[in-house]
Image (cartoon, grey):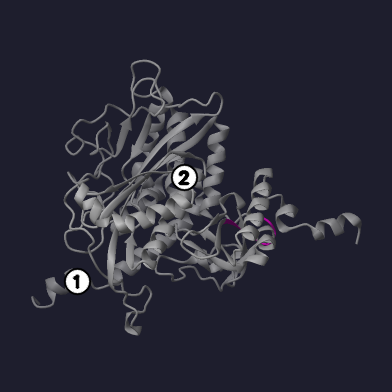
Amino acid sequence: MSSSQKRSAAASFVERHGLWSDQQFEAAAKAEALIEEQRLEVVRLSFPDQHGILRGKTVMAPDAARVMRNGCTITTTLLAKDTSHRSVFPVFTPGGGFGMPEMEGGGDFLMIADPTTFRVLPWAPQTGWVLCDLYFQNGKPVPFSTRHLYACILQKLADAGFDYLAGLEVEFHIFKIENPRFAPRDAGWPGEAPEVSLISPGYQYLTETRFDQIEPILETVRHAVLALGLPLRSVEIELGPSQCEFTFQPQAGLAPADAMMLFRSAVKQVCRRQGYHASFMCRPKLPNLMSSGWHLHQSLRERRGGGNAFAASQGDLLSPVGRHFLAGLLEHARASAPFTTPTINGYKRYRAYALAPDRVIWGRDNRGALMRVLGAPGDPATRLENRAGEPAANPYLYMASQIVAGLDGIARKLDPGPPADTPYETAAPFLPKSLEEALAALREDQCLAHGFGRNFIDYFVRIKEAEIARYHSEVTEWEQKEYFELF
């Protein structure tokens, strides 16, 4: 073996394939020092799957430095699963149903840490955590990795001269667990949901007394979120029973999507350890509850000069770039719906006069519109708020869809038309009424197919169609009540 071959063999997987930047190598050194200083025992390595759920493995702290640089194996079948954890691709056939030999046979790919995301978990004793990207054994990125896909789309935006900024406004529910449903008969794919009770009766929006009722658990969650370094801006009591909202300062690039992933996972883990159940499901099937949304505040920052590309210098509400970007979001809103609202349940939120949009329209600071435009001429905080999203959305796909659609609007110089003062009465295309309708729109959208890649669109649609097929095969309570006695 030559000297160069020996050096190559001694180098880590990350070094051999040039996967880290200088910043990441520096962050890895800091993470390793932190592991020793705080005498951590384990490090969790996690990756966001196609549904925006964190999956991964836990390694012993003494092995963490080596594993971060050389990867941790994890089965490829995790990318073949729907929300019930059932594999919907024939993984034990040639190509594994993906047409790729790397994905067949239930083999492994590698989780490679992004050390800039390393954190010590405040709720789990002596535990570190790091977000990972997925690579095949040959060093190529896994094309179905949603974080990688989003990073590629961010690069296209950078090539066009902009950075993407996003602020999160996330609604969710917290309940007290009465019965976790751990009896063997409750197990299944999926298992039975826990029985819960409310922690506030609701319908007193932003009232001090209602906030104080649930503040003890919110305090615990808040401390954990701040300890993770997430840019928390506000904690609010929402209109519905047991419903609250957390908002975050805007961040650039991967950071807001990573923050959403860690936030959702942290909230669920912290609440569960305290005997509570946090749910980011859009519309839980419990009496008198309100739907939850995830409003995405977004703008573009000019890479040359650093200014807000949406801010108008004259009397207009938006700059030409901002208007074109807005028009692109409207043009592709129906096709983007599977990414903003990826669950069957989420479409039950699109109802008129329910503080949720029901049609493709924009308005000036109007909470009934799909796209709410906030700002004023010269205002550096000028932004577009997409009110379509549900809190269960995969943040990488949600944000990627916005960039792809917005860039198309800029490239084609699209016009968004006039704003709507009465968004629930203005004539405009309706948002999809179901996930099936949304997927049909996605299949036909050439812009999103080009931006995401046709292979990814086909992959995503197949997984969601499997979810829909399972839904339609179930006999619902409505059917039992409607037909069982009548016929």
Is residue 64 covered in magenta? Answer: no
Please give the label number shown on residue 373.
Answer: none
Tag 2 residue? 256
Q: Nearer the viewer, residue 154 or 116?
A: 116
The tag earlier along the polypeptide, 1 or 2, is 2
Q: Position of residue 197 (x, y in %)?
A: 23, 67
Of the residues tagged 1 and 2, which is closer to the observer? 2
Q: Pointer 1 and pointer 2: residues touching (CB < 8 Å)?
A: no
Quick one: SS at disc 2?
Answer: helix
Specify few, some or many for label 2: CA neighbours under 10 Å numbering under 14, 14-19, or 20 or more: many
**Residue in the foreground of this view, choosing between 95 and 34:** 34
Residue 203 vs 71, above or below: the answer is above
The extreme right residue here reads 2
> For the magenta stretch, what is the residue range?
132-140
Q: How many marks?
A: 2
Amino acid bearing label 1: Glu
Q: Amino acid at mark 2?
A: Pro
Task: Please tell me whether residue 416 is drawn above or below residue 467 in the rendered image.
Answer: above
Image quarter hosting the N terminus:
bottom right
Q: Is residue 169 left or right of residue 29?
A: left
Q: CA distance from mark 1 to mark 2?
A: 39 Å
Q: Nearer the viewer, residue 76 or 296?
A: 296
Left or right: 419 in relation to 312? left
**Is there any visible trace of residue 485 in the rendered image?**
yes
Which residue is labeled 1 in the image? 477
In the image, is residue 479 above or below residue 226? below
Q: Nearer the viewer, residue 307 or 333?
A: 307
